[in-house]
Image (spheres, coloured by chain):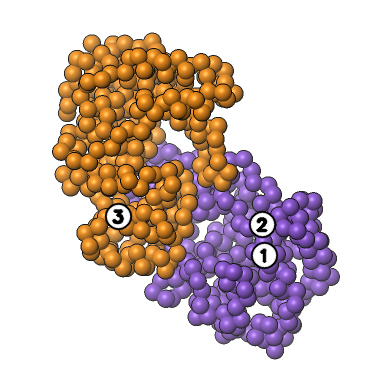
Chain colours: A orange, B purple
């Protein structure tokens, strides 16, 4: 939620000299983006998003992220399209950072999803999974279960200061995930962060998906499990079965879930809750000086995690 | 540099129902604005700025700020125009905060001003002073010398931890200002914060002025003194006499300075440096938890203050 890097008018002019975007009318830093600095760039032709990639993003991953958006958008999936400069490059350098310009996606996030909203989100997720087939760069999920022990280690000592019992919860749930995590269900490119703020709606229709900077290769059903965490809980942390059924129906209308995926969904949802709990509790305990973001409350996900412990496929409307 | 208040899609819809701005296409929080939460609102007709006024702005001052922008813009001065709703109101409430929509001003700030840039800034400042004549709401400058003792008191104990000698500097400069501050030079509405980030340029021409939330009634030459602080120092804090002459020439081409104003300019410039030093050192020492801004370095202004101690009107190219 910040501008980490200021872009001077001179540096912008130099960067844009390689592009064919028209005359610059304004550049406004956008509040949003924990990982990157984002500007809204207005020219006399259009609006664009200018992103400068900061330290938290691995530069080696950028061809995956940019390439994936390009792959999806050029196949009709509603997401930002990376803009290429006159040399055919979509990735350059600005103010000593890797930088890219992507098209501006209209729409707004929905504060209170309905089952209809969730159905559309589920359909779009499955369309993303299908459309990404054939994308030929791979990216390992750095936040898969193999990455969780380090996150447990760095949080466990202070976790009970955030919420009594949280230390035991994360240790025992890590053990559970390590024992029960699937090995051979369908995999492919997943968004891995399809929360409300990354899905835009316009006139009651889903207008597109943004923020592919957690996308990776992983189990497709794990993305759906993240979606259940993201879309199917009330503001008061109550599970909304109608929204969950709609999300899964939407997904299944585009890509049918296998029997194994259905049976593993409680394990995956539980793991997804643990993954977001772990990053949130670490962010909560380690707010760096000069941080320009308010950390999210980890307790949103300890509550989900405790809920998922008691679930079966029937909880999600599956049988 | 932050979004302090989130605006839900439902709340926005309710707020905009009273306006005639077309269909909403997007709403993006803008990084920028220490005092307020700003969104860029895009409709199918135009771009607008939606501002929610946070605690640091006195609600009683809002009719002054909004009214001043309306007064200036409707007389052809290039600044945002507050948009009125169907009931003729430019100020409403959104997410439990006072809120207003203003027109979007094109242009970008200039990273490295030239004498030409400064001449335009000076002209525009004087045009603001002239155009604001006849605006019939008054606002006392809360950051005039009468407001400085409290800022000295709250910073003096820790000031030397920011920079050795700073405590003595602010105490002695407060005394100097209190003895030498003018009483009866020309006054009127001043911007009081006409720094580079509040002045936009497009195609080498000044396209407009934003951020009137420090505007007040005070000595007109004090605004120029703030401008000298804002526009006439290099990145390495060196005074740029050519820029300063150009700023004053630009100003004087629209409104001639009186003999008394010229003679008092060193005192006013010194006071202006003290005023920004005082707010910066207080912000620096009291970064609240959850602050979403990086405080500016107070030393930028202790350096200016020390420079101004040795100045005469001739330093500014005046005689």
Q: Tell me: A35 left or right of A71.
A: right
- Which quarter of the figure has residue A26? bottom left
- How far across and how far down the image is residue A238, in percent? 42, 19
Give yes or no for contact between labels 1 and 2 (Cβ–Cβ under 8 Å).
yes
| Sequence-first tag of 1 and 2 | 2
- Which quarter of the figure has residue A225? top left
Give yes or no for contact between labels 1 and 3 (Cβ–Cβ under 8 Å).
no
Q: Tell me: A294 left or right of A199.
A: right
Query: Is residue A247 placed above or below A283 in the rendered structure?
Result: above
- How far across and how far down the image is residue A103, in percent? 28, 52
Q: CA distance from mark 1 to mark 3?
A: 39 Å
Whether residue A289 appears in this view of the structure is yes
Quadrant (top left/top right/bottom left/bottom right) for the C terminus of chain B: bottom right
Q: Residue at x 28, y 13 (%)?
A: A313
- How far across and how far down the image is residue A77, in percent? 20, 42
On residue A91, the disc is 3
Q: B158 or A117: nearer the eye?
A: B158
Q: Residue at x 37, y 17 (%)?
A: A177
Which chain is indicated by disc 1? Answer: B
Q: Tell me: A34 left or right of B67.
A: left
* Callout in the foreground (1, 3): 3
- How far across and how far down the image is residue B106, in percent? 41, 65
- Which quarter of the figure has residue B62? bottom right
* Callout in the foreground (2, 3): 3
On residue B301, the disc is 1
Task: Give the structural element (helix, strand or loop) at label 1.
Answer: helix
Residue underneath mark 2: B280
Task: Give the structural element (helix, strand or loop) at label 2.
Answer: helix
């Amino acid at each position: 939620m910040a501008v980490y890097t200021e872009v001077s008018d001179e540096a912008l002019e130099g960067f844009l000299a390689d592009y064919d975007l028209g005359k610059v009318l304004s550049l406004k830093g956008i509040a949003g983006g924990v990982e990157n600095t984002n500007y809204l760039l207005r020219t006399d032709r259009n609006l664009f998003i200018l992103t400068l990639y900061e330290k938290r993003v691995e530069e080696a991953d950028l061809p995956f992220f940019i390439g994936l958006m390009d792959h999806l958008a050029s196949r009709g999936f509603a997401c930002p399209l990376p803009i290429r400069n006159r040399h055919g490059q979509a990735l350059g350098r600005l103010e000593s950072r890797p930088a890219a310009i992507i098209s501006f996606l209209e729409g707004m996030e929905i504060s209170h999803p309905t089952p209809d909203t969730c159905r559309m989100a589920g359909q779009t997720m499955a369309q993303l999974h299908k459309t990404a087939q054939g994308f030929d760069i791979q990216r390992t999920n750095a936040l898969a279960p193999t990455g969780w022990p380090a996150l447990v280690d760095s949080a466990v000592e202070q976790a009970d200061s955030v919420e009594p019992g949280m230390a035991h919860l994360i240790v025992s749930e890590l053990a559970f995930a390590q024992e029960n995590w699937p090995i051979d269900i369908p995999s492919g490119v997943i968004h891995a962060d399809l929360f409300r703020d990354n899905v835009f709606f316009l006139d009651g229709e889903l207008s597109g998906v943004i923020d592919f900077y957690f996308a990776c290769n992983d189990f497709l059903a794990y993305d759906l499990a993240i979606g259940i965490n993201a879309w199917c809980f009330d503001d008061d942390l109550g599970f909304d079965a109608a929204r969950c059924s709609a999300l899964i129906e939407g997904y299944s209308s585009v890509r049918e879930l296998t029997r194994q995926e259905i049976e593993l969904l409680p394990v995956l949802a539980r793991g997804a809750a643990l993954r977001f709990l772990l990053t949130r509790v670490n962010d909560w305990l380690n707010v760096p000086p000069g941080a320009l973001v308010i950390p999210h409350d980890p307790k949103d996900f300890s509550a989900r995690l405790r809920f998922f412990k008691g679930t079966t496929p029937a909880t999600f409307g599956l049988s």
